[in-house]
Amino acid sequence: MDRIVGVALDLVDEEGAEALTLRSLATRMQSSTATLYRHFSGRADLARCVVDAVFAEVRLDEALVETSTWDVSIAHIAENMFTVLERHRNVAPLILSEIPMGPHALRLRERCLSVLVTNGFTPLNALRAYATLARYVLGFAVQAASEAASSGAAYRIEGHGELDLPVTAYVQSVGPIALADEFHFGLELMMDGLRSRHARTPAP
Amino acid sequence: MDRIVGVALDLVDEEGAEALTLRSLATRMQSSTATLYRHFSGRADLARCVVDAVFAEVRLDEALVETSTWDVSIAHIAENMFTVLERHRNVAPLILSEIPMGPHALRLRERCLSVLVTNGFTPLNALRAYATLARYVLGFAVQAASEAASSGAAYRIEGHGELDLPVTAYVQSVGPIALADEFHFGLELMMDGLRSRHARTPAP
DNA sequence: ACCTGAACACCGTTCAAGT
DNA sequence: ACCTGAACACCGTTCAAGT
């Protein structure tokens, strides 16, 4: 059944999330839609498996995670998640339906919480820190999937007349921001906040 | 056509985003699906309008935004967005498809950028700060919509055997974190980061 | 000019019937 | 036991036909 998920992920990568249809997948498998129900309980289950297949691609530098300070480790994990999600940006729409809870997603969370707790974070703050980072990375990935209408669409709206947005226009003179730049800016913001809250904790 | 959008938003609030069907909306309007195409170019357009109707509900305390320091103003705007999205949490799945670009969403962005720029942020950093905050709030709202399976589902996975997640188990002994608490923790993290980056800027 | 029933081409899901 | 064609109840979208 891992092979079916692999084919499904290929399909999403190549044709987008909305092209992931039981019929289209059955065709690629040279099988029938009814057969897919032997492996998945339905389309939602299939989507969950595809999402977890993406999380399975996260490869951490375990030596780095083990030997670095907690902030470097956490940032490394977050950047790895971002990289993998960027590589499979078409899967983003599949993530929205529910928070990833597949085995690979859970193991990644375990790893993160472990780093935080062994570095003196309280359970509550470790959970908070992980939740915030995970939501940021996932929320970023979900929205980054639709980067077409980012510049100047949807200006002519029906009843509202012309919008004038002087500051928006002024500020956009710097041109569009690269996705990776935007991501790292926000990530550093949160790491700053975590560091300042966690200042002067003795090494274990 | 604002009335149709209002009915559509009611429908989403009451029955969820997947219940927003051209047929179900036509039934509520005592009309036909074909008639809806006089007002919207299709389901995607309808969804965009519903999302912007939610943004239209954001009511800022203009006196507070005007007179407070930039960080208080920005946090106030972010919290307002969060409150409104929480009130209409069923619309979250409609947001994923594309970044909100309706007139009300654009005006809210204009207001945010205005606060940042008049307080000495460079155009680049104002854009970055807004993008990070907006993605955080939206990403949070999107994922907050599915809070059912948060505790302990999806443990028994087919081929992988039992997962043991000791730190996860230990850390979850503090119980589930309230959504609002989680949101505020992350927001404060980012505000801390923004403040430290923007330290010692003279008032205009 | 405005509206709509009915059709078209899809979709997820199910099940009797085949092997 | 395993697979599948065909059906069912949907969906978005279109259009000839009505008023």
Image (spheres, coloured by chain):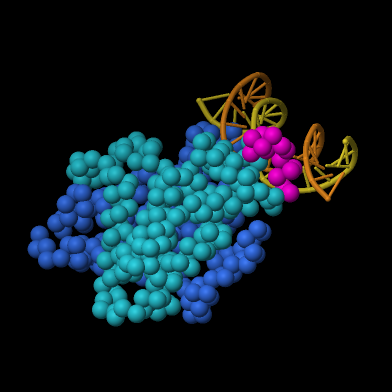
Chain colours: A blue, B cyan, C orange, D yellow
Q: What residue do we see at 49% from left, 51% from top?
A: B57
Front in this rendered view, residue A39 or A73: A73
Q: What residue do we see at 23% from left, 40% from top?
A: B175
Please, is residue B204 above or below residue B149 in the view? below
Q: What residue do we see at 41% from left, 46% from top?
A: B86
Whether residue A43 is visible to the viewer of this picture, yes or no, is no
Classify residue A136 by image quadrant. Answer: bottom left
Q: How many marks?
A: 0
Please, is residue A23 above or below residue B117 in the view? above
Q: Quadrant of the C terminus of chain A?
A: bottom left
Front in this rendered view, residue B117 or A40: B117
Q: Is residue B134 left or right of residue A146?
A: left
Quick check: is B32 in the magenta stretch?
yes
Q: Position of residue A65 (x, y in %)?
A: 24, 62
Q: The magenta stretch spans which residues?
A: B25-38
Quick check: is B98 in the magenta stretch?
no
Residue lying farthest to the front in this orientation: B63
Q: Position of residue B16 (x, y in %)?
A: 51, 39
Classify residue B31 by image quadrant. Answer: top right
Q: Is residue A199 left or right of residue A173?
A: left
Please, is residue C13 above or below residue B132 in the view? above
Classify residue B200 by image quadrant. Answer: bottom left
Front in this rendered view, residue B201 or D17: B201
Please, is residue B26 above or below residue A174 in the view? above
Q: What residue do we see at 47% from left, 65% from top?
A: B109
Whether residue B198 is visible to the viewer of this picture, yes or no, is yes
Q: Position of residue B125 (x, y in %)?
A: 39, 75
Q: Position of residue B48 (x, y in %)?
A: 58, 53
